[in-house]
Image (cartoon, rainbow, N blue to C red):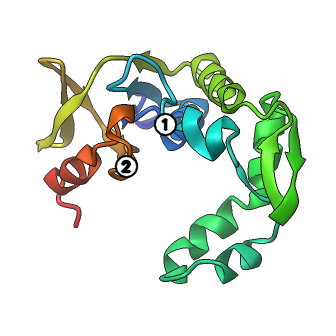
Amino acid sequence: KTGRRSEVTTVKIAVIGAGASGLFAASMLAKAGAEVTLFERNDRVGKKLSLTGKGRCNLTNNCSPAQVLENVVSNQKFLFSAINSFTPSDTMDHFESLGVPLKTERGRRVFPQSDKASDVVKALEKDALSSGVTIVLNSRVTAIRKVGGEIVVSACGKEEKVDCAVVATGGASYKGTGSSGDGYDLARSLGNK
């Protein structure tokens, strides 16, 4: 919420991509008071997430942030702030608070007790919806541009003006999951390198 004492306005945010990062970001932003619209190009959320860990979803490793960084092959500095701000322990606590009981297996790998990635997807989607996030499926974002002090998001022939956009599309991987690398172009269109 922003504004002077007598005028309060809600920050409008578009989140692009309803995978793990997009669902999590959208929920946290909505809980902080933003009006959040989550755009997903697929017909359901978490399509790629449903496939992770051979359908079991390795959520994190049960270890310290320092131990995570020890296993990062290059550019540990890039992850330093993130892994120390939201640790593997925080990740486990978060999913258990969403009703996903966890277990730790060989190599400290953490999975849902059910061994079903779909339980993780359902929990993230339920959290987003209960936080007030509007999820728009079958809606591929084709452009993001700055217009004055606003950002305009184009999807399915419509435009939405927002105060901020979060690009959470992931990298290019399994094309059948919608993970085509579009996010790089969207980020570049806003001046990111």
Residue displayed at 82% across by 65% down: 107
Using the rendered view, name the quadrant where residue 72 is placed: bottom right
> Tag 2: Cα neighbours inside 10 Å, few (<14), some, or many (≥20)?
few
Q: Secondary structure at mark 1?
A: loop
Specify whether residue 24 is in view.
no
As drawn, 67 above or below 143:
below
Which of the two labelled residues, at mark 2 and mark 1, occupies the earlier sequence position? Answer: 1
Alpha carbon separation for disc pair 2 and 1: 9 Å
Tags 2 and 1 touching, CB below 8 Å: yes
- Whole-percent x, y for residue 17 in the image: 39, 35
159 sits to left or right of 102: left
- Whole-percent x, y for residue 168 in the image: 40, 44
- Amino acid at pointer 1: Lys
> Tag 1: Cα neighbours inside 10 Å, few (<14), some, or many (≥20)?
many
Residue displayed at 76% across by 42% down: 94
Residue displayed at 89% across by 45% down: 103
- Amino acid at pointer 2: Ser
Residue named by callout 2: 173
* Label disc, if present, on residue 48 of the rendered structure: 1
- Whole-percent x, y for residue 49 in the image: 55, 37
Specify whether residue 70 is in view.
yes
Using the rendered view, name the quadrant where residue 16 is placed: top left
